[in-house]
Amino acid sequence: MLKKALTAIAIAATLMVTATAGAAEYKIDKKGQHAFLQFRISHLGYSWIYGRFNDFDGHFTFDEENPAADKVTVTINTASLDTNHAERDKHLRSSDFLNVSKYPQATFVSNRVEKEGDELKISGNLTLNGVTKPLTLEAKKIGAGEDPWGGYRTGFEAEGKIALKDYNILTKLGPASQEVDLIISLEGVRQ
């Protein structure tokens, strides 16, 4: 009888360890606005125009030991574009650029995550302006730990680059303004 009880305890302990190991689910902290999806594009080669999307949401899984199990999904409301200039924002939302009335959302869905040293290469598909193309983001984990409210958070910073023409944005902006740099910083709250 004691042998059966010890075996049952050992099995239960193994199941508990297995359940806590592996990829953890995180929701991007939109409520606390600890997430930023920013971009920049050269203005004629003389300066940078910076902007951001104020309304986006998503989730990710993260497994420190097995990046191949990681996944990222983000949905962006394209009308939330903000470059701190109302007239420019109106033009960028038009059919000349993002065509937000026809394509109100952009999405990024990962399909592979690889670890290279301290960096993660997050590959997936970005759908923007009705076009879906592969995109790879270079990401770094900033930190992780318990927050003051009893939750657990993990934060990342990532960068990427897209060519406007790849997403049917064909407005002529000059040779220095053909690509957009993506700058992403976010915290996820473990679910």
Image (cartoon, rainbow, N blue to C red):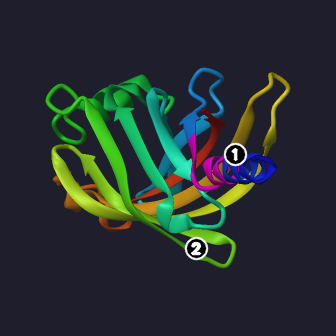
User: Residue at 49% of width from left, 28% of height from top?
Assistant: 54
Instruction: Specify whether residue 21 is painted magenta.
Output: yes
Give the x, y percent position of residue 61: 53, 49
Residue 166 in the image: above or below residue 13: below
Residue 70 in the image: above or below residue 175: above
**Dot 2 alpha-carbon crowd within 10 angstroms: few under 14, some 14 to 19, many 20 or more:** some
Give the x, y percent position of residue 144: 77, 48
The residue nearer to you, when weighing 16 against 171, is 16
- Specify which label sits upstream in the sequence, 2 or 1: 2
Location of mark 1 (residue): 154
Give the x, y percent position of residue 141: 69, 58
The residue nearer to you, when weighing 152 against 131, is 152
Element type at mark 2: strand
Q: Residue 140's image quarter?
A: bottom right
List the single residue furthest toward the front. 1
**Dot 1 alpha-carbon crowd within 10 angstroms: few under 14, some 14 to 19, many 20 or more:** some
Residue 163 in the image: above or below residue 90: below
User: Residue at 23% of width from left, 42% of height from top?
Assistant: 97
Q: What amino acid is labelled 2 in the image?
A: Lys
Instruction: Specify whether residue 7 is painted magenta.
Output: no
Q: Residue 142's image quarter?
A: bottom right
Element type at mark 1: strand
Location of mark 2 (residue): 115
Q: What amino acid is labelled 1 in the image?
A: Thr
User: Residue at 63% of width from left, 70% of height from top?
Assistant: 119
Q: Read off the magenta span.
A: 14-25
Q: Residue 135's image quarter?
A: bottom left
